[in-house]
Amino acid sequence: MDIKLATAFYDRTDVLTIASELLGKVIVTQIDGERTAGMIVETEAYSYHEKASHAYNNRRTARTEVIFGEAGRAYVYLCYGIHKLLNFVTNKQEVAEVVLIRAIEPIEGTSIMMRRRGLKKENHQLTSGPGKLTKALGIDMMHNTISLIGDVIWVEDRGFSFTGEQVMQTPRIGVDYAEEDASLPWRFSLANNPWVSK
DNA sequence: TTGACGATAGTCT
DNA sequence: GACTATCGTCAAC
């Protein structure tokens, strides 16, 4: 049974719960007439009250405005001038919290993803990182602010469930600049899943 | 108007 | 392990 997650899933007050519950959910994209999908195996939470967040201290700019908007939208931004990173906006309006999608396990359209990534052989390089999965799924800056309840990018619950020791909780990657907040264990990943980023 | 800086990934040594 | 491509964003000038 494939069930598309509704706004209510994202419109909750605990971003850590949402980040952990997204493990096992399936991202589906229908872009350029091509359908691809993958199961989320790694996420990170970001909140306005910690320094790693783009919206730290409720800083509002043109870029961060979507984070303060309604839950259930995509926040896509350019990192290092090259990589597009996909986030899900959560919580109610004016509360800036998001979940970064860091890795997925390919489920549908693997050959399409390989072509987009320029890979000839299938391997874990395909989607094991935040910049890799967006390229594989066909997600670009034009998808910033798009609804996750629509028919371009959405998330389904296909019944995959992970709990307890199957879920790892560790510090986030690449946020050393966040000083004391860099050590917050806000990264969630599936234990022993080969598609988790290195 | 300018310059410093990334929530990374791929290449080279 | 080290190096760096590449560009939008943001704050300071």
Image: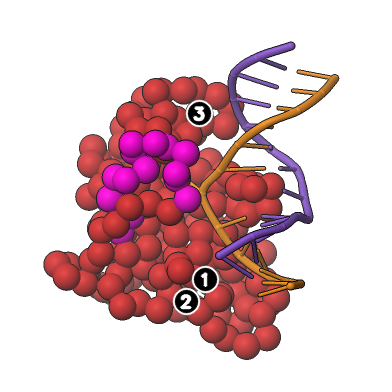
Chain colours: A red, B orange, C purple
**Image vertical order of residue A164 relative to residue A118, above or below:** above
**Mark 1 lies on residue:** A127
Rendering quarter of residue A51: top left
Depth check, mark 1 against mark 3: the one in front is 1
Query: Which comes before the other along the chain, label 1 or label 3?
Result: 3
Residues at circles 1 and 3 in contact by the CB criterion of under 8 Å: no
Q: What element carries label 2?
A: strand
* Residue A71 is a magenta residue: no
Co-location on one chain, circles 3 and 2: yes
For this rendering, which residue is in front, A189 or A19? Answer: A189
Rendering quarter of residue A49: top left
For this rendering, which residue is in front, A102 or B2? Answer: B2
Residue type indicated by callout 3: Glu
For this rendering, which residue is in front, A179 or A157? Answer: A179
Q: What element carries label 3?
A: helix
Q: Mark 2 lies on which chain?
A: A
Q: Position of residue A96 (x, y in %)?
A: 38, 32
Co-location on one chain, circles 2 and 1: yes
**Mark 3 lies on residue:** A65
In the rendered image, the quadrant that contains the N terminus of chain A is bottom left
Q: Where is residue A17 in the image (x, y as percent from the top left)?
A: 22, 50
Query: Alpha carbon of mark 1 to alpha carbon of mark 3: how far?
Result: 28 Å
Residues at circles 2 and 1 in contact by the CB criterion of under 8 Å: yes
Q: Can residue A26 be seen in this view?
A: no
